[in-house]
Amino acid sequence: MIALTVPLTKSIFFVFTPEEKAQQITRTLEFDYVTWTLDAVAIKTGEAGISVSQRMTPAQQHQLVVRYFELVRDLESVKYSVQVIYADPRVSHPEVEAKEELAQQELLQTALQRLDPLVEDILQRQVANTLVKMGIPRLGEAVPPVLYHTSATPKSLITSPRDKIVQDVNLSLMAELTLEETNQLEDQIEASIGESALVVGTGGIGVYPTMIMRTSDLRWVVNTIAHEWTHNYLSLRALGLNYETTPELRIMNETTASISGNEIGEEVLKTYYPELASGEGNSVKLAAPIEDDAFNFQAEMHETRVTVDEMLAQGMIDEAEAYMELRRQMFVDQGYIIRKLNQAYFAFYGAYADSPVSAAGDDPVGEAVRQLRADSPSLATFLRAMGAMNSYSDLQKTVGS
């Protein structure tokens, strides 16, 4: 008995990862994916019996989708008007002052909820048909099928070490978090784990069915439907299965999905909404665009990231953080409302490296993905090659770097 009890009297040290430490704080705030997915599956199953949109002509489908996004734009405008009234300190009874706007907001929300399943069905079919047209499915049908549900999307808590830019934590939080709650949570996380923290909004989530927020930007919506479908596609292959294995694989996944989403989305617009198509074709660019006199957000953010990387490599942590705050103020002065610019910001947005000038800076992973797309005869060929990869070294060998 003595031999058995001695080890129990010794001190036990628990080593928690940054994510485990963060979860001790965020547990009650985390997004409930299980409930959301069950509800979404039930809704999509019910929609499967709706064939109204299939009985519509292409012209009628086009008209319905365009009208839907006009209503979303009207809703966004009314919501903004309500916010202005409630924020005005001179208004003592905002609920009375905004009575007409609130009534209009309710009517628009009701109308959009009725149209949601029809528009979802139309856009799903248009994206699926485009995938087949581009030769991406091998058997003539998208696998998995294109399914998305319009929904408020969760926020993400991101952390990064202060001395280097790498994502340590990515936790999904409730969409309803207020700005005050967000600021308090970030401060609490930073004090607890000693890392840079940021809560960011998300527009789409690659669960299944995928989750897409409601917005009046049709181009963004079709790109995001295709982007999240690409994640579903990759999740059945080596690249997607290894998403969390290394930072390089996360960048490979996100950059691939961004390239794919943009190209598929552009093809959807060309076919079904030609008035919105850019006509630029392949969206992948290997070189930075020529600068003009206008403020270039992407170029300025790229410069910021490169400078921060250099400063952190030299151990200049405090100086890098002071520099990021100065740059944030400059972006705000130019009309880009960035609440916080820190290591966590770049750890999150730097994974989307489909452009040579971006928050990814001079990261070689995104450059290699873009090079492979440029070398591939089609998006289908590119996706098959990327999907089979298990590591960054696989990508390096493929592009010969």
Image (cartoon, grey):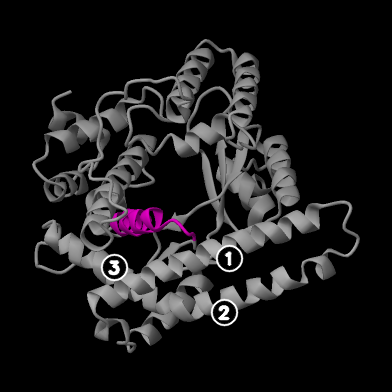
Residue at figure coordinates x 39%, y 79% from the top left: 44
| Residue type at the position of mark 3 | Val
Q: Position of residue 378 (x, y in %)?
A: 11, 46
Question: Along the horizontal axis of the image, is 106 left or right of 349?
Answer: right
Above or below for 163 versus 388? above
For the point 55% across and 42% down, the residue is 158
What's the distance in space between the residues labelled 2 and 3, CA to CA?
25 Å
Tell whether 187 sits left or right of 333.
Answer: right
Instruction: Decide if residue 161 is on the left or right side of residue 371.
Output: right
Q: Residue furthest bottom?
A: 49
Residue at position x 48%, y 23% from top?
Answer: 300
How far across and down, in percent of the image, does residue 249 sit? 32, 40
Query: Which of the two labelled residues, at mark 2 and mark 1, occupies the earlier sequence position?
Result: 1
- Which mark lies nearer to you, 3 or 1? 1
Q: Is 52 in the magenta?
A: no
Mark 3 residue crowding within 10 angstroms, few (<14) / some (14–19) / many (20+) = many
Numbered mark located on residue 19 in the image: none
232 left or right of 359 in image: left
Within-10-Å neighbours for mark 2: few <14, some 14–19, many 20+: few
The residue indicated by pointer 3 is 146
In the rendered view, tell whether residue 293 sits above or below residue 192.
above
Dominant secondary structure (helix, strand or loop) of the stretch shown in magenta: helix
SS at badge 3: loop
Q: Considering the numbered disc 1 on the image, is that residue within a helix, a strand or a loop?
A: helix
Residue sitting at x 31%, y 32%: 366
Q: Amino acid at mark 1?
A: Leu
Residue that carries the numbered disc 1 in the rendered image? 75
Which label's residue is closer to the chain start, 2 or 3?
2
Q: Quadrant of the C terminus?
A: top left
Amino acid residing under circle 2: Thr
In terms of depth relative to the viewer, which is nearer, 378 or 19?
Answer: 378
Viewer-nearest of discs 2 and 3: 2
